[in-house]
Image (spheres, helix red, strand yellow):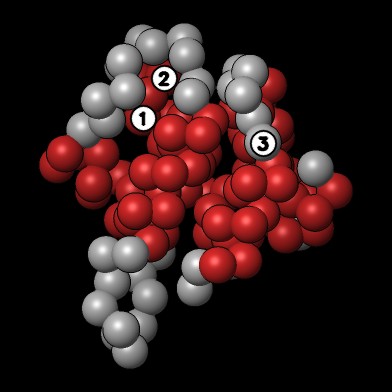
Amino acid sequence: MERVKQAVGGDEPLFRAFENFVARAPDADLDRLFEEVDASDYSLRDWVEALVEFDRWIGEGGTPERPFAEMVGYVHCCTLINAPLVSLPKLKVIVNQSLTEFGFERF
């Protein structure tokens, strides 16, 4: 979690929200998350913001489960939406729009 804490800097509310998300995700695999981040054009902070947004969206649906691997996979797919050489929009916005438009059928 130290790498995440460094990535979000002084944004303590974001770090705490991510910690709470990971605590509710029994299959949390931070190494897999770091691999996905390293292979993407987005920073770890962007991914943390997107996963916290995803967690918020699932919570609004009243679902207590947090399928970490599937959520990371969903965010990974969202990173592929952008056309090459186009400036990167906020990842959490892409995730929010994708969830709103397409949903998440894990459950």
Nearer-the-camera pick, 74 or 50: 74
Cα separation between marks 1 and 3? 21 Å
- Among numbered discs 1 and 3, the one appearing first in the sequence: 3
The one of 66 and 39 positioned closer to us in this rendering = 39
Report whether 15 appears left or right of 52: right
- The reply to whether dot 2 and dot 1 touch (C-beta < 8 Å) is yes
Picture quarter containing residue 58? Answer: top left
Query: Residue 83 in the image: x percent, y percent?
Result: 25, 78
Could you say which disc has been placed on residue 29 in the image? 3
Q: Amino acid at mark 3?
A: Asp
Viewer-side label of 1, 3: 3
CA–CA distance in space, label 2 to label 1: 5 Å
In the rendered view, does 75 fall on the left or right side of 52? Answer: left
The answer to which image quadrant residue 100 occupies is top left
Tell me the residue that label 2 is attached to: 59
Q: Residue sitting at 63 percent across and 46 percent down?
A: 32
